[in-house]
Image (cartoon, rainbow, N blue to C red):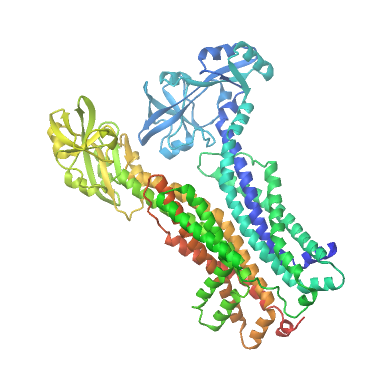
Amino acid sequence: MLHHTFAQLRANAGRVAASAVAIVLGVAFVAATLVFTSTLQTSMARALAAPELAADLVATSRTAQLTRAEADRIAEVDGVAAAQVRYTGSAEALWAGGNGYAPVFPVAAEPQLHWFDLADGHLPRPDGHQVALDAAAAEDAGVGVGDALTVKTPQHVARLTVSGLVDTGRSVLAGGSTPALFLPPPVMQQLGLTSATAVDVVLAPGADPDAVRQAITHALPQLQVHTGQERADQAVEQLGPVKTMLNAVLLPFAGIALFVAGFVIVNTFAVLLAQRARQYALLRCVGATRGQIRGSALLEALIVAAVASLVGTAVGIAVAAVASWVLGLTSGPLQLSALGIGVPAVTVPPLVGIVVTVLAALLPVQRATRVSPLAALRPVQALPAAKRIGRIRLVLAVVLTATGAVLLGVAASVGEVKLAVPAAAVGALGVLLWTPSLVPLTARAFGVVLRFPTGHLAAGNAVRNPGRAATTSTALMIGVGLIVMLASGTATAQQTARTAIEQRYPVDATLVSQHGGLSPGVQQQARRLDGVEQAVAVPAAQVTVDGQPWQALGVPREEFARVVRHDPHALRDGVALVHPDVLGAQPPAARWHVVGPDGSVDVAVRASKLVEPGQLVVTSGDLARIAAETPVAALWLRIDPQVSAKEFVDDLKSLYLRPDAGVFELGGSAPIRVQVDAGLEIMLSVVLGLLGVAVVIATVGIANTLGLSVLERMRESALLRALGLTRGQLRGMLAVEAVLLAVVGAALGTALGVVFAWGGSTALFKDTGFEPVFTVPVGVVGAVFAAAVAAGVAASVLPARRAMRGTLAQQLADE
């Protein structure tokens, strides 16, 4: 039987390849996930430990921060060439084109401790009022060598000149939109940045690291001393939870791909075994036992699984390598290091692939060996069609589906996300039990519109074997359902976030001056930007309330109503708007006496999310009564909803480059909405790409199912051709059959995806205190159906070729 098994593999290489493709894709997914997460963990750790890796030894304190005196003591130890305190901190950086908070790193006097490379200019000198910047972020910010930069800390303000740009290898330490600052230690001390986390030690040539370490520990027993590599290894261990989290996020998608692959494997081996029904019957007639045939078939599945799993593992490692390389080319904050190919990445994927394949092959093998030799030798070359759903299964399906639906509705109404997840799982299991009846019923419903003869034939053929049709459509239903569910959930999150952001930030965009007033040039250019519907200049004055300082903003009442989206009629003369937290326990009708430089006014205080803490908004008339000089402190903008928020925010950011820009901040709902949308879109793109693997595998399943149908109906197709059916009509009939199975799977998946998205997103947002705005992305659903039709047509190509292979006489023969 062993010789027979290998002979069958050689003879049916094409059919085996279909199953192997599904296995390769699923296993590759697992391998790529394990390798990529390991690589990411190692790269992040090494990036975080870049300063440690530059040092020979690193001394850290067990209890407190390190001091310069301890560094001097270390420098006196034999074998130490240099010891440098590593100060850390952050500061506000202001330049001609913008501002922001940035991390600050020391430029050590010892060149070996420079964990960065000089890209342009020179490193700052201790007495030269100079600073170096991270090159990548500086380029994005429009800052170069020779530009002026102001650095602010709570203790001091320093005006520095950019002396150079350094390449940090896109380290996560220096990553960010604001360029990281590199300063000499004396300048950091002047700025009050004296927090010391470690002392970096450089050894003298020929010094023994272990001996020097012991000497430092003996001289300063309160310190811990490690090599730079040991510190990097510690960072890898500390980031173990990151790897666990990434695996927890990505491996479920690999599990989905393997689950769908299981459906494909079942149908694939049903194709193979149906094709060999007579061969097995002959083997049984000449003495082969049922166990020998079963063992031969399972051995074949094992061989296919082993080869495909090894190929899948190699493909997965290659995919992870390409992904790491591509990520390294991007402008992201992390440069990935060498691939993290550990033992689990090499052993787990093949084992998973083999187990899944053999388990999936058990069912068709068991069914095939149940057929008696005489029945298999009959002219009709087909395995028994699956029976209709049994009563017990029907009752269980009804109970689970109804229970899941009720629980999901309850979870959505009360906002309990912990209930929504098991409810969706119970409902999904119930629907899966329904599929042998649900898929044929749905296929017949779609088949009603197929009024042409070949369409009627295709609709009947699609459900001739209900069990196999259900298995095929279920594989696609799972992939499509997850895609629609996540796309709808993301669209709901976007719309809900937009509504919440507009309520929290009623103005679309604001330009707020940080020092003095907003320059007239910036105001004028901002008003001329495409998409501006309304612009309001907002003057300000410093006032007091009960002796406490406040900033009063004055806005004309009519313009306030035109620029504010939420509660536009809240402002009127004699009313001041303040942040809700400011009122606290004060009564709703509280009145304040506001004193300005040139007068005072009594106002009724109202809460508004428009106002920041420390501010109050009054009408321009009330502001004029208390302050004669009121420079424009802000510009409020209302944006045309049809304009891209991202493009508009980019246009606003270009104002930073004006010579008279000064220092101002962008605010309002538009910049926040852009950040939220960008994060959600990236997440959705990644998720859709991951789930796309499952859809590709399901498409292979459609081709396999159609191939088995063609095999079973070979003589029937020949008879139709003999009666006048053309080759084109036969191709069309098979294409319609494949498209029908694909559309049924897509339709059921879309319905389930929308229901689960509604229940899950509604429960999630209510649980977190937001009012959900459920949204179904019609474009995504349309694209899913278009892809299903295209997949069906593509899946019918090879089976159609097989159906037309040979002459009519050969196909009509009994063999």
- Pick the front one: 632 or 660: 632
Q: Is residue 738 left or right of residue 312?
A: left
Task: Please identify the residue farthest to the right as the structure is shown.
Answer: 287
- Pick the front one: 396 or 700: 396
From this view, report whether residue 766 is shown above or below residue 538: below
- Pick the front one: 660 or 259: 259
Task: Please identify the residue farthest to the bottom as the structure is shown.
Answer: 723
Q: Where the N terminus falls, by quadrant?
A: bottom right
The image quadrant that residue 291 belongs to is bottom right
Identify which residue is drawn at 62% across, 52% down: 29
Identify which residue is drawn at 46% across, 62% down: 781
x, y percentage for residue 623? 16, 35
Identify which residue is drawn at 70% across, 73% down: 383
x, y percentage for residue 465? 63, 73
From this view, report whether residue 483 is shown above or below residue 45: below
The image quadrant that residue 457 belongs to is bottom right
- Pick the front one: 257 or 649: 257
